[in-house]
Amino acid sequence: MNDATPIDARIRAVLAQHGKLARDAGTLPESADLFEAGLSSHASVNLMLALESEFDVEFPDQMLTRSVFSSVAAIRGALVQMLSA
Amino acid sequence: MPSAHLADLVHEAPSLPRAALRIGIDLVHVGAVERSLSDFGARFSDRLFAPGELRDSTVAGRLDARRLALRFAAKEATIKAFDLGAIGLGWSQIEVIADAPAAGRVRLHGRAAAAAAGAGSYEIAVSWSHDGDVACAIVVAVPAADAGTAGGAPAGASRDELRYGVGAADIYNEEQN
């Protein structure tokens, strides 16, 4: 995906600020499991709210699943879906 | 909630397996909740908590982070107990109601209620505790002995009789009211 890189960079910046991961959000593989990397349930809420601010979107309830916030790639997929709607 | 709407939700909700016992636990740092309130304000509190929960968590005119942390832990414990992480639901669909200083019940709404209804009727107990910066909640759910199958609360059952009853039992009452 051509626009993956700039979106990924913004996702990773938000992740670094709010994810409280045990690993470096900047170098985490895009498919790495964020919950395995230390993302807690509460941190995932902060991540969601910060992503909404960063991308000016609102996650609908149907998207508030564990899988949507399970990796950088999954988050990107959800954001692309919302931004293209 | 109108019955037709609930029926739609039940149809859409992924089916959950019946289980003899469901249990969930979660820990939340009170300080982290304080930071969330500071960083996100009402976007955080209104997105996660129902009006009654916010009312019960207000002390001296301001939201109390410890009370919010206990309720958030109870919501997450409920999600774990019923494996709702894949359903796609807002946290306010899991409403925590305090009946005592360290115990309460959970009332499910919307997709959360529909998913639980698909698994049958359960009685759920919630207990919570805190120590310093850590808030903890545990949820234990057992099939309701006299509630029958999904949506089948006992005839004439009242909310008082279902003190710890949620899921399908509570859905039944909501539909009747």
Image: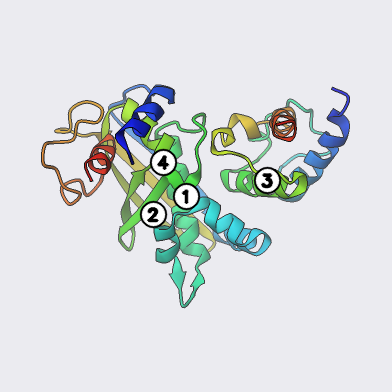
Q: Earlier in the sequence, mark 1 or mark 4?
A: 1
Give x and y (percent) for residue B104.
31, 54
Distance CA(mark 2)–CA(mark 3): 25 Å
Chain letter for mark 2: B
Q: B141 above or below B101?
A: above
Which secondary structure lies at badge 2?
strand
Q: Is residue B74 left or right of residue A53?
A: left
Q: Which quadrant would residue B54 be assigned to in this image?
A: bottom left
Same chain shared by disc 3 and disc 1: no
- Position of the N terminus of chain B, as image quadrant, is top left
Q: Which residue is mark 1?
A: B73
Distance CA(mark 4)–CA(mark 2): 12 Å
Residue at left 63%, top 31%? A68
Residue at left 87%, top 31%? A5
Chain letter for mark 1: B
Q: Which residue is mark 3?
A: A47
- Asked whether the beta carbons under mark 2 and mark 3 sit within 8 Å of each other, the answer is no
Give x and y (percent) for residue B18.
31, 23
Question: What is the number of the mark on residue B128?
Answer: 2
Question: What is the number of the mark on residue B65?
Answer: none
Q: Which residue is mark 4?
A: B78
Front in this rendered view, residue B122 or A62:
A62
Three-letter residue code for mark 1:
Ala
